[in-house]
Amino acid sequence: MAVTVLNHSLIKHKLTNIRRKETKTKDFYQNVSEIAGLMAYEITRDFPLKEVEIDTPICKTIQYELGNDIVIVPILRAGLGMVDGIRSMIPTAKVGFVGLYRDEETLEPHEYYAKFPDTIADSIVLLVDPMLATGGSAIAAISMLKNRGCTNIRYVGLVGAPEGVEALSQAHPDVDIYLAALDEKLNDKGYIVPGLGDCGDRLFGTK
Ligand code: PRP
Ligand code: URA
């Protein structure tokens, strides 16, 4: 298991935009999407390639394509904000969905939806969710993916709390974790500090 906090000036700049409380839905969504695209570019840097023979207008040549199918799995709702940005980098990626909400009192995740491509077990899965707080949602989502046979799963989040990173690493030590930022802590309501507030509400304008 590895925890990677992507150190990139553009990512830091865009994260500052979404942390600002004045940032409104349209700009919030755009920045989340762009950060996700930049993260995908970095994370896929060493994904396996396969050789393919093609014809250029000039001659035959051996070149390279991605060696595995890639499936993006957002945890609803907030994970949806990351999908378009990653698809702009990997347009061949398929998309599955996990619906989970966190009980506001207990902070326990509750499953309400799951839909995956048939080929998911043989694919590299990018599980995406902007917020890794207690880690409960990510842990539950990864268990759902493993129950469907997935063995190659990466967790991609924007902002993580140390508590969530620790819990996720303990529960699923085989899953690499990628974050745009590792914040200080959780507050007594389970929100990340300094964080960016309720990501789902800010993405979809629901509060
Ligand atoms: C948020 C967030 C994560 C989860 C993180 O979702 O998008 O899925 O909380 O918290 P955890 O690490 O403590 O599980 P929420 O349950 O608020 O649902 P929403 O995306 O529909 O708003
Ligand atoms: N979910 C959010 O949207 N924000 C947090 O800070 C924690 C969980």
Image (cartoon, helix red, strand yellow):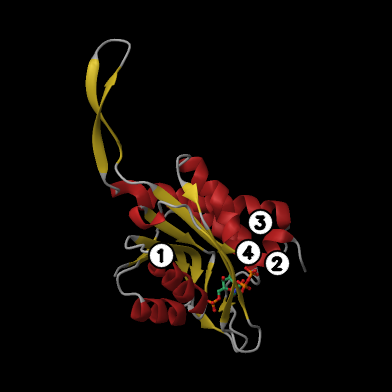
* Proximity of marks 3 and 1: CB atoms separated by less than 8 Å: no
> Counting other residues with Cα less than 10 Å from the Cα at mark 4, is it few (<14), some (14-19), or many (20 or more)?
some
Circle 1 residue: 148
Which mark is first along the chain, 1 or 4? Answer: 4
Query: Which badge, 3 or 1, comes first in the chain's sequence?
Result: 3
x%, y% of residue 150? Answer: 36, 62
In this rendered view, identify the residue nearer to me: 121 or 155.
121
Query: Can you tell which of label 4 and label 1 is closer to the viewer?
Result: 1
Q: Are marks 4 and 2 in contact (CB under 8 Å)?
A: no
Q: Which residue is mark 3?
A: 28
User: Which residue type does callout 2 highlight?
Assistant: Asp
Identify the residue at horizontal 28%, vertical 10% (top origin). Answer: 58
Q: Earlier in the sequence, mark 2 or mark 3?
A: 3
According to the picture, the residue beneath numbered tag 2 turns out to be 201
Query: Tag 2, which secondary structure?
Result: helix
Mark 1: few/some/many CA within 10 Å (<14, 14-19, 20+): few
Farthest-out residue, right: 207
Please provide percent x and percent y for residue 138: 47, 72
Distance from Cα at disc 2 to Cα at disc 3 = 11 Å
Residue at 47% x, 52% y is: 117
The mark closer to the camera, 3 or 1, is: 1
